Every structure is written in structure tokens, then in C-alpha cells.
Image: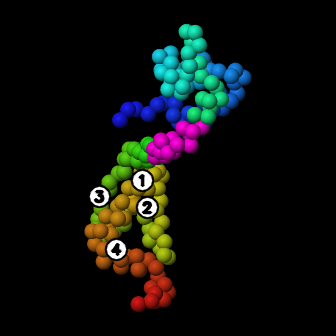
Amino acid sequence: MPAKPQWLLKIPSLLEQLRALDAPVVDRSVCERVFGVWRRRAVELMHSFAGYQSGNTVLLDRLELIRQLEDLEASPEFAYERRRKARLAENLEKLQRYRAAASVQIPVLPVCEATLPDGVVLEHDRMIVEFTGVEQLLGRLYAVARVAAGNFEAFRTAVDASRGPDIANSMPT
């Protein structure tokens, strides 16, 4: 499958520039500047948009070029390419966020299966975590998860005990 033309998604800008022109025709140099292509590609484009020969120069009817670009802009190919580019940008943004998160170094603290790490307190239906940075916060939360996974029943008992007798007795069974 041939590569998509680089100017395809620039059609709205191309139309704006072409509408601002006063001249009834577009020559090669204008085509180069508007489409952002080199000489040879500009001539190819002009022929593909029904350019005509006037002496040694290829010209395009400006209004006909605008009409053809408007048709292209309304085509399924343009809509597909716009969606593809949006998905690509979204995926790149997700990748950048993932790479930023993956670069965080979380300190893994030794865990005693029966106790919560320093700086973590359970009280009155809350877990209070003291931390000085995001890495320390994530490390302490990870340690809490390891304590819970190591001995879930003991962890549940500690959580229930932190809730106090009033809350523990009011819980439905």
C-alpha cells in the first residue's frame, strides 16, 4: 500500500490558503508553497489535479482545485486518516504516561506479616499513610498489600479492631 500523502490532513489549511489567493490559477511555485512539497512532487500533484499546460508552465484552475480538495476532505479516506492520526496521538500519550510511571522506583521494604509498615496507621474506619514523596507513598501502600496478602485473616482482624466497638457491633452480619 503506498504511503499516504503528507498533505492529506492539511487539507483545511490548504483550502484556507487557496481561498485567500486572488489569482484565478495556481502555478508550480504556489503549489510547492501551499502543499509544502518539492518541485517534482508539485508537478505530479498538479497533473493529478487536472493541471493544464500553458507554454512550458503547468497551471491549475484555483476554484477547481478548491472543489477537488473539498471533495477529498469529505471522503471516507480523509475521515479514516484523521481518526487514525487521533488514535496514534492517543496511544503515544498513553505510552508517555506509562513510561513516566514505570520509571518511578518504589522502595520495597521488608515486611513483617503481622504488622503494618512505619507511617501507616489504621484508626476509626481510616488508613492514615504518612509520606514525604510519591515513591515512599507507593512503597508503603505496596507493603500494606503484602501484609494483607501474607496473612489476610490477621489483616482483617486488625482492620476490624481499628474500627472500634461501636462500628464493629453495628455492622450487619
Q: Amino acid at mark 3?
A: Pro
Q: Amino acid at mark 2?
A: Gly
Q: Position of residue 155 (x, y in %)?
A: 34, 74
**Label 1 Cα crowd, 10 Å radius (few <14 / some 14-19 / many 20+):** some
Number of the label disc, if any, that sits on residue 110: 3
Element on which disc 3 rests: loop
Number of the label disc, if any, that sits on residue 119: 2
**Label 3 Cα crowd, 10 Å radius (few <14 / some 14-19 / many 20+):** few
Q: Amino acid at mark 1?
A: Gln
Measured Cα–Cα span from mark 4 to mark 1: 21 Å
Number of the label disc, if any, that sits on residue 136: 1
* Mark with earlier residue (2, 3): 3
Number of the label disc, if any, that sits on residue 155: 4
Q: Which residue shows up at 41% across the image and 90% down it?
A: 173
Measured Cα–Cα span from mark 4 to mark 2: 16 Å
* Mark with earlier residue (4, 2): 2
* Mark with earlier residue (2, 1): 2
Asked if labels 3 and 2 touch by Cβ distance under 8 angstroms, the answer is: no
Residue extending furthest top? 56
Q: Nearer the viewer, mark 4 or mark 2?
A: 4
Asked if labels 3 and 1 touch by Cβ distance under 8 angstroms, the answer is: no
Q: Which residue shows up at 36% across the image and 79% down it?
A: 157
**Label 2 Cα crowd, 10 Å radius (few <14 / some 14-19 / many 20+):** few
Specify whether 122 is left or right of 23: left
Q: Nearer the viewer, residue 25 or 161?
A: 25
Q: Nearer the viewer, residue 157 or 103?
A: 103
Q: Amino acid at mark 4?
A: Phe
Asked if labels 1 and 4 touch by Cβ distance under 8 angstroms, the answer is: no
Span shown in magenta:
70-87
Asked if labels 1 and 2 touch by Cβ distance under 8 angstroms, the answer is: yes
